[in-house]
């Protein structure tokens, strides 16, 4: 009898610990500050990848359409996966895809775009990563959907684009247009 | 009455029981004393009353906020909503940089000022930020 | 190419594992008298396959094959060959492959070394061990495969964090793993012994070797990690009560308890259940440690890659094993409790039991301190951390009785000793130690509550073990370990109480006064190296006795871009002078920390002595 009670208590106790750990795993483990400002930093000035000319981000998003700002690097693996979505977004009218090349060598970046195709209307360089931080980036890849009219960030995607996010972008644009 | 053996045994069990409860008591008492809570600058701002115990505050080191003099390093921790001024005497880790994540441990003087006694930054076996890493694994 | 070979070898090993599980359960059922030769060959094939797989990973690292994702993530062409090789187990995927390799090789060695024992026991051990191996194989193949292909092939790798480029850290994980994995053999074999009803002297004698060997590796592994933290991290300490460190300490407490209990089982044939419980707990803690570290559930200064799916896998696997162990324990426990022999209060058995209870207490303290933050976060969402004072406050006072028992216990006789004839010799030594420590504390004006008893008992243990070292008997290994431990306690006490630290922000040319020392920042040079740029500072620390020059460095690596501080440490047998500096911002100020740490070398030396006792015990001829 005592043996059975002992047994049950031990089993229950281990199950309890098991579930605590299981729940503990669900918690995100990094302390992420949430950026509140929803305006895009238009005063950001950076060099273009191909001709190394200095340009303001605001100048690139001054029409009446939407912009996708995508932070990427040739050394970044998930960037390769999301590339096909960017190429598809390029085909969509009313979207202007701007790339920010994060901590990369020019030669590697150019080669990457040659190999995989170039979805960007313009690529800005960010050799030391500071520009991306000013934009509020946590890591790469990261993608912002911006409304050019009021320079608001409509949606921010941390991590690579996928089917769900891609469809969402198209849907948002469709709704905003109407 | 009872045999010597039984008495001895009872005494032994009592002794074990007492020492175990003493141990448990000490562990939990000292646990209570040595717990350090982790807060963000916004949570610090919204504290119902000023925390007098040691706390940890985490966030980003604000751009151009580090000021150094002979004795102290002063900087601002931000979570992009609220800011907290930190002054610190002591040594900083390698990864302490403007625009990077930081955790400061110390005592709150008021809701926007922390006197830090320790600065922590993380080192990572994979250099990428965790989100990227996470994303990487998702896409395998 | 190496990628495919590595990958397919793992699959073959998986098939071998499945085959072994079937074959060994069949053999057990058919009650065969001899070991099936198929089992032996399957096991050889399995070990060989895992070895090939591990070797192909190392090969991929050596030739910098960036079509392998693990290599790409953790290596770089400019890296020195030594770190290319150590990089192969410095990452998550590779380290698990190493675990697996040691698992299979240990099982192989076990099978060769257990020829004299019951066939059913050997088969059962193989069965349990294969259950562990199959879990690891599935884990590696499906959540952390080190042989994933990358296409198109990148030109250059991501590099290995320079902090991890250190000789002590390169060999630290393999050594620690040898210890961890050794506990898996103890686990499997104690379950097997339980089922066979042979938890007795013969089994104890056999498994003792495995316990000692795991204990040695675990001790040295912890030592190396600690040395790395001291020399490379530049925080000026050797133990920080960080969760990742605690995780290696917990199985150590348990294993040390087991190491003592198994001697009682061997000599007196008692404490059977307790031995089994300790074996199960030791292995669970080793596995649990891997879970805590690898799942990213802990908030530690050493962050590893976070991946919840891996965490869930290890967690389920671990609890499946634990539940299995609990079931087996409750079913077969009775079978082994045949003889309950008498023992008396004043005996070696009791002393060892007391040692065990202390070990369990230290273990609980560390365990609670480590997992309490996780529990609290799950229950009410608050993020907390537990500071080092928690551990110090709880462990230091209990060290006092612990040291006393440690000094007196080994000299007690088995079964029954007579306490009434108080050993006059010991009493004199005891009084002497207390007087010495009292004078010491008075002389230096130490104001720490437990200083007198801790120093006193440290000295007491020291004197007693020194006295016993000269008297030659069969327990020399135990004497050396206990002597090492007394040295360890004394050196950390001196180190902790008399350490001095000074931090300041200094410009080149500045001078600071500290205690009776003058610290001068003399100059700063920039040196370009192959894969990093180095800022070398020159400091002069002088007092009335003389002066020393210290030149710490800050290295700026390119691949990946990282800053590391290299402390300059001047070690003598009396004390260490530790100086480290750091760049804060480009405003001319540098963050400087100087530490004076007495008897630092003795801490390392005493741990080496403790493990040397173990090594001696391993090679000791059985009487």
Image (cartoon, rainbow, N blue to C red):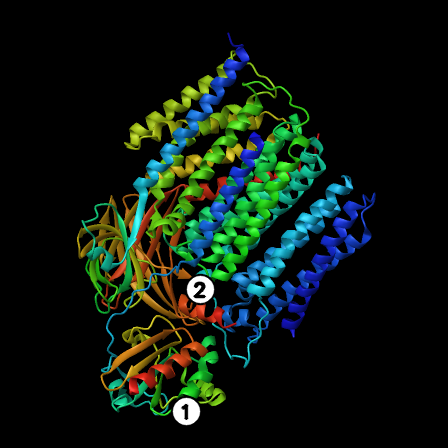
Q: Nearer the viewer, residue A39 or C51?
A: A39
Name the disc covering residue A91, or none. 1
Q: Residue furthest right?
A: C33
Mark 2, Cα crowd under 10 Å, few <14 / some 14-19 / many 20+, is many
Residue C74: x percent and y percent? 50, 68
Label 2 SS: helix
Mark 1, Cα crowd under 10 Å, few <14 / some 14-19 / many 20+, is few
- Residue at 67% from the left image edge and 37% from the top image edge: C194
Whether residue A124 sits left or right of residue C484 in the image: it is: left
Q: Nearer the viewer, mark 1 or mark 2?
A: 1
Name the disc covering residue A102, or none. none
Does residue A4 sit above or below C232 in this rendering? above
Q: Nearer the viewer, residue C151 or C159?
A: C151
Q: Nearer the viewer, residue C478 or C153?
A: C153
Q: Which residue is mark 2?
A: C162
Q: Chain of mark 2?
A: C
> Which quadrant of the structure image shows residue B128?
bottom left
For the N terminus of chain A, give its image quadrant.
top right
Q: Chain of mark 1?
A: A
- Does the CB distance between marks 1 and 2 fall below 8 Å? no
Residue C61: x percent and y percent? 57, 69
Instruction: Answer yes or no: is residue C608 visible.
Output: no
Residue A126: x percent and y percent? 34, 80
Residue C145: x percent and y percent? 58, 66
For the C terminus of chain A, give its image quadrant.
bottom left
> Which quadrant of the structure image shows residue C114?
top right
Say yes or no: labels 1 and 2 on the same chain. no
Instruction: Answer yes or no: is residue C323 visible.
Output: yes
- Residue at 61% from the left image edge and 43% from the top image edge: C325
């Amino acid at each position: 009898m005592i043996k059975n009670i002992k047994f049950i208590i031990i089993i229950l106790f281990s199950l309890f610990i098991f579930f605590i750990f299981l729940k503990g795993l669900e918690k995100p483990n990094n302390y992420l500050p949430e950026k509140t400002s929803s305006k895009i930093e238009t005063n950001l000035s950076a060099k273009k990848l191909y001709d190394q000319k200095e340009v303001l981000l605001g100048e690139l998003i001054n029409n009446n359409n939407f912009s996708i700002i995508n932070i990427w690097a040739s050394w970044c693996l998930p960037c390769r996966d999301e590339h096909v979505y960017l190429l598809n977004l390029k085909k969509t009218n009313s979207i202007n895809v701007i790339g920010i090349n994060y901590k990369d060598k020019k030669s590697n970046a150019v080669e990457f775009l040659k190999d995989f195709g170039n979805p960007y209307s313009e690529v800005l360089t960010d050799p030391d990563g500071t520009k991306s931080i000013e934009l509020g980036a946590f890591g790469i890849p990261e993608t912002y959907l911006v409304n050019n009219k009021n320079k608001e960030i409509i949606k921010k995607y941390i991590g690579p684009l996928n089917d769900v996010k891609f469809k969402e972008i198209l849907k948002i644009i469709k709704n905003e247009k109407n | 009455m009872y045999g010597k053996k039984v008495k001895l045994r009872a005494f032994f069990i009592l002794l074990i029981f007492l020492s175990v409860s003493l141990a448990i008591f000490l562990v939990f008492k000292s646990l209570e004393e040595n717990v350090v809570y982790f807060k963000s600058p916004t949570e610090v701002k919204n504290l119902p009353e000023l925390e007098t115990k040691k706390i940890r505050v985490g966030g980003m080191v604000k751009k151009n906020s580090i000021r150094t003099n002979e004795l102290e390093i002063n900087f601002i921790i931000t979570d992009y909503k609220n800011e907290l001024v930190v002054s610190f005497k002591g040594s900083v880790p390698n990864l302490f940089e403007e625009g990077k994540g930081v955790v400061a441990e110390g005592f709150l003087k008021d809701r926007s000022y922390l006197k830090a006694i320790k600065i922590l930054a993380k080192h990572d076996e994979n250099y990428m930020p965790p989100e990227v890493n996470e994303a990487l694994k998702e896409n395998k | 190419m190496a990628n495919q070979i590595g990958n397919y070898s793992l699959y073959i090993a998986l098939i071998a594992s499945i085959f072994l599980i079937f074959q060994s359960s069949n053999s057990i059922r058919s009650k065969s008298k001899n070991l099936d030769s198929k089992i032996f060959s399957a096991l050889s094939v399995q070990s060989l396959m895992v070895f090939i797989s591990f070797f192909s990973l190392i090969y991929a690292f050596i030739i910098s094959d960036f079509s392998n994702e693990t290599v790409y993530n953790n290596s770089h062409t400019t890296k020195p060959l030594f770190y290319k090789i150590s990089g192969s187990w410095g990452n998550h995927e590779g380290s698990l492959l190493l675990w697996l390799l040691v698992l299979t090789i240990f099982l192989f060695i076990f099978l060769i070394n257990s020829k004299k024992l019951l066939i059913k026991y050997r088969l059962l051990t193989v069965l349990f061990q294969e259950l562990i191996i199959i879990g690891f194989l599935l884990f590696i193949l499906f959540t952390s495969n080190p042989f994933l292909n990358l296409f198109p092939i990148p030109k250059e790798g991501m590099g290995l964090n320079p902090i991890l480029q250190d000789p002590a850290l390169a060999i630290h994980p393999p050594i620690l793993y040898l210890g961890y994995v050794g506990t898996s053999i103890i686990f499997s074999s104690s379950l097997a012994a339980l089922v066979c009803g042979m938890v007795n002297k013969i089994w104890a004698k056999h498994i003792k070797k495995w316990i000692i060997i795991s204990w040695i590796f675990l001790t040295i592994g912890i030592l190396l990690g600690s040395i790395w933290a001291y020399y490379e991290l530049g925080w000026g300490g050797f133990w920080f009560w960080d969760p990742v460190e605690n995780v290696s300490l917990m199985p150590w407490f348990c294993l040390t308890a087991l190491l003592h209990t198994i001697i009682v089982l061997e000599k007196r044939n008692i404490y059977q259940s307790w031995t089994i419980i300790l074996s199960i707990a030791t292995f669970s803690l080793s596995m649990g440690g891997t879970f805590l570290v690898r799942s990213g559930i802990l908030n530690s200064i050493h962050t590893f890659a976070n991946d919840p799916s891996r965490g869930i896998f290890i967690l389920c696997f671990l609890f499946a094993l634990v539940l299995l162990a609990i079931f087996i324990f409750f079913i077969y426990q009775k079978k082994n409790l045949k003889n309950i022999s008498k023992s008396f209060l004043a005996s070696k058995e009791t002393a060892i039991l007391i040692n065990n209870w202390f070990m369990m207490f230290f273990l609980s303290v560390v365990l609670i301190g480590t997992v309490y933050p996780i529990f609290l976060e799950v229950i009410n969402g608050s993020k907390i951390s537990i500071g080092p004072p928690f551990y110090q406050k709880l462990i230091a006072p209990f060290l006092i009785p612990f040291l006393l028992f440690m000094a007196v216990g080994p000299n007690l006789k088995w079964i029954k000793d007579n306490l009434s004839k108080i050993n006059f010799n010991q009493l004199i030594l005891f009084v002497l130690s207390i007087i010495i420590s009292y004078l010491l504390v008075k002389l230096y004006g130490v104001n720490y509550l437990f200083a007198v008893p801790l120093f006193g008992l440290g000295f007491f243990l020291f004197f007693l073990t020194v006295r016993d070292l000269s008297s030659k008997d069969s327990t020399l290994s135990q004497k050396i370990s206990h002597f090492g431990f007394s040295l360890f306690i004394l050196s950390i006490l001196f180190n902790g109480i008399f350490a001095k630290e000074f931090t300041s922000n200094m410009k080149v040319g500045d001078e600071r006064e500290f205690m009776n020392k003058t610290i001068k920042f003399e100059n700063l040079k920039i040196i370009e190296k192959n894969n990093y740029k180095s800022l070398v500072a020159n400091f002069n620390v002088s007092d009335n006795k003389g002066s020393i020059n210290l030149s710490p460095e800050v290295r700026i690596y390119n691949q990946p871009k990282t800053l590391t501080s290299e402390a300059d440490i001047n070690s003598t047998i009396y004390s260490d002078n530790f100086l480290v500096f750091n760049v804060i911002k480009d405003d001319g100020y540098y963050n400087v920390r100087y530490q004076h740490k007495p008897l630092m070398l003795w801490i390392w030396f005493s741990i080496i002595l403790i493990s040397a006792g173990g090594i001696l015990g391993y090679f000791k001829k059985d009487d």
